[in-house]
Amino acid sequence: MKKLLSLAAILLLSGCYTGTSLFDGPACNSPKPAPAPAPEPCVQPIIQPVPCAQPVVAPKYERLAGVIYFAIGSDYLNDADRAELSRIAQYARANNTPVKVLGHASHKVSQAALSKKDAINRDISIKRTQKVANTLASMGVNPSLISASAYSDTRPAETEVDARTEALNRRVEIYFGY
C-alpha cells in the first residue's frame, strides 16, 4: 500500500498523472513545450557598434594607453594626436603588445539631422576607429595585433549637460593587452 501511495504521490507531484483513477496510468506522453531559446551572446564585432544590454567592462589584462578626442563630426587627427599615437605605436612595436581601439561619438547632431542621429553617430564612430587603427598600423604596429570596435553614442564617458561633457564623448580609447 505504501508503494502505491508513493507512486501516486510521484505522479501527482510530477504533473504527469491526469487520470481519475490511480490505475489509469501516467499521461506523460503528451508533447512538452519546447525549451526557451538560449539568449544571444554579447558579441563585439570588429568596427561595428555593440548592441549589448549589459555594460562591457574592460578585463584586468587591459591597460588604457591613451585617448584621442575629436571635433564635432570629425575624424581628423591633428599633430598632437599623431604624436600620442606615435608614442603608443612605439610601445606596442617594442613589446609586441595587442592593441584595442574603441571608437565613440557624442549624442549631439545638428537639428536637421535628428532623424538620422543613430546612423550618423554610428558612421562617425566607425570612421574615427578606422582612422586610429589604420594610423597605428601605418606606424608599424602589427595589424594582426590590432582589434577595433565602434560603439556610436552607446557608451558615453560623461552625461552630456554642456559642451565640455559632450566633447569628452567624442573619443577613441586605446588599450594595451598584457
Image: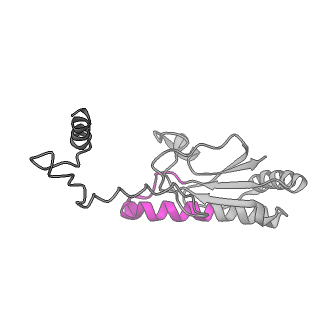
Queried whether the magenta region covers residue 125, the answer comes back as: yes
> What residue is at 66 percent from the left and 65 percent from the top?
130
Report the side of 4 relative to 119 (left or right).
Answer: left
Image coords of residue 159 (percent x, y)? 48, 39
Q: Looking at the image, can residue 75 be seen?
A: no
> What residue is at 25 percent from the left and 41 percent from the top?
7
Residue at the far top in the pictured view:
2
Q: Looking at the image, can residue 147 be seen?
A: yes
Report which quarter residue 75 is drawn in: bottom right
Report the side of 152 relative to 33 (left or right).
Answer: right
Residue at the far right in the pictured view:
94
Residue at the far left in the pictured view:
20
> What residue is at 23 percent from the left and 49 percent from the top?
16
Queried whether the magenta region covers residue 158, the answer comes back as: no
Report the side of 162 relative to 85 (left or right).
Answer: left
Magenta span main SS: helix
Quadrant in the picture for the N terminus: top left
Image coords of residue 69 (percent x, y)? 64, 50
Residue 60 vs residue 103, the one in the foreground:
60
Location of residue 3 with respect to 44 vertically, above or below: above
Q: How is the image coloured?
A: one colour
Residue 162 vs residue 128, the one in the foreground:
128
Residue 50 vs residue 91, the one in the foreground:
50
> What residue is at 69 percent from the left and 40 percent from the top?
60
Image coords of residue 129 (percent x, y)? 64, 60
Image coords of residue 123 (percent x, y)? 53, 65
Tally of numbered discs:
0
Report the side of 91 relative to 38 (left or right).
Answer: right
Q: Which residues are magenta?
A: 105-128
Residue 14 vs residue 9, the one in the foreground:
9
